[in-house]
Image: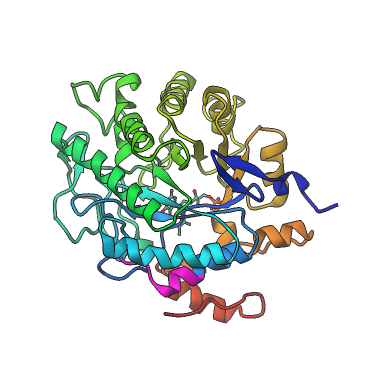
Amino acid sequence: MAAYSSLFTSLHLDSLALANRVVVSPMTRVSATTDGRATAQMAAYYARYARGGFGLVITEGTYTDEAYSQGYVDQPGIANDAQAGAWAKVVEQVHAAGAPIVLQLMHAGALVQHNRFTTKTIAPSAVTPPGEQMPMYFGEGGYATAQAMSETDIIEATQGFVAAAQRARSVGFDGVEVHGANGYLLDEFLTDYMNKRDDDYGGGIGNRVRVPRMIVRSLRDALGNDFPVGIRLSQTKVNDPDYRWAGPEDAEIIFHALAEAGASYLHVTGAGAVEPAFADDGPSLTTLAKRHGAGLPVISNGALYQPEAAAAMLDEQGADLVSIGRGALANSDWPHKVRAGERPRDFDPASISPVATLDNQAAWETDNADVFEPLAGG
Ligand SMILES: Cc1cc2nc3c(=O)[nH]c(=O)nc-3n(C[C@H](O)[C@H](O)[C@H](O)COP(=O)(O)O)c2cc1C
């Protein structure tokens, strides 16, 4: 029998059939053209994960509109037809290599390091985010103070997600994942110190979850029932790794609201997926998502690159799928290796240093050519 067999059983996300439960975690590679078009190098990079046996590829966070959503230099977008057309080639190659591909839709909110459309940033309230910009995405120094979103801004951002998802479907993506995690716009609505609004979108968690819920519901209404719309959630943020929701009641309200809005799956992430979400010995965020997510499939993420940990997440904590980030950077064939009983190699931070570009990855792979099928340039 294949090693870690629970990782290698099939399942469906709505109508989408997956051959196994191992997913590529979304990872920003700041390697698109300056005007946000995906490249041939990106197509080769994503297709390689499909060849390596992943049951599903989730793309890097991709901006949704030509207003405030872009966060990074050379980040891909799906805000216009040219950007959508460029993604079509990525989709085609991933499909040809045998895996479905879901596009992660991202609005950077206050965490903007570069936006070629505007110098202003928006967030639920006029707040300066804590923390520093990320050098691995060409950032430096603190973040700008955001402008508080008007009701119109909220509607326009929502419409941006819907139009982006429609473009994604039109170029063949198998689903979309709303980025509700890690400190970006939707997560800012959930976060007490980023959301100080005194209207229906601020105050208690029941109000703070309204915008993420409205976006999921708008996507579901616009796309119908056979196009998966997932959402990614975390307590921690790229600019505040220690942040926690107020307690398990908040987790219950958030997961329940998003499931009820029509999400196809919940993708929960944090530094360590197996760790208790709140108290020292309480349930993990994955367990809470399973408990309060109305039976939706849950993708669990965070330090699951050892096969034992990934399999235990399915067998013992009830996750339906696992997503692998840094472990996939070091092993584009993680599923094939694990299934064959081989140990995946350790992640090397040098592969994303000083910047997380694919050129840097390719250079690192050339230096480690004994173990890597080299990534094509371009
Ligand atoms: C280079 C890099 C880029 C990332 N970009 C994204 C992103 O675009 N969207 C997202 O939701 N998470 C992003 N993440 C977080 C990963 O998806 C994942 O949650 C994190 O690495 C923890 O999982 P791991 O322990 O399997 O690496 C990124 C992580 C890395 C290392």
Q: Is residue 49 above or below residue 253?
A: below
Relative placement, left or right, of 152 versus 141 is left
Secondary structure that dominates the magenta span: helix
Q: How is the image coloured?
A: rainbow
Query: Is 144 in front, or is 358?
Result: 358
Q: Position of residue 311 (x, y in %)?
A: 71, 44
Q: Is residue 341 left or right of residue 129?
A: right
Q: Nearer the viewer, residue 273 or 51?
A: 51
Residue 154: x %, y % from top left: 20, 36
Front position in the image: 293 or 219:
219
Query: Quick check: 137 left or right of 358?
Result: left
Q: Residue at x 64, y 47 (%)?
A: 21
Q: Quadrant of residue 85?
A: bottom left
Query: In which quadrant of the rendered view does residue 218 lie?
Result: top left
Reply yes or no: does residue 42 show up in magenta: yes
How many numbered marks have been drawn onto this rendered protein structure? Answer: 0
| Span colored in magenta | 37-44
- When the figure is inspected, residue 133 is found, relative to residue 184, above or below; the finding is below
Whether residue 356 appears in this view of the structure is no
Tell me if residue 262 comes above or below residue 79 in the rendering. Answer: above
Q: Position of residue 365 (x, y in %)?
A: 56, 76
| 17 vs 340, nearest the viewer | 17
The quadrant in which residue 297 appears is top right
Residue 243, given in percent of the width and then of the height, sits at 40, 35
Q: Is residue 159 visible?
A: yes
Which residue shows up at 46% across the image and 40% down it?
A: 230
Q: Quadrant of the C terminus?
A: bottom left
Asked if residue 270 lies in the magenta stretch, the reply is: no
What residue lies at 45% left-to-right and 43% top-to-bottom? 227
Q: Residue at position x 40%, y 67% from top?
A: 355
Q: Is residue 69 above or below residue 84?
A: above
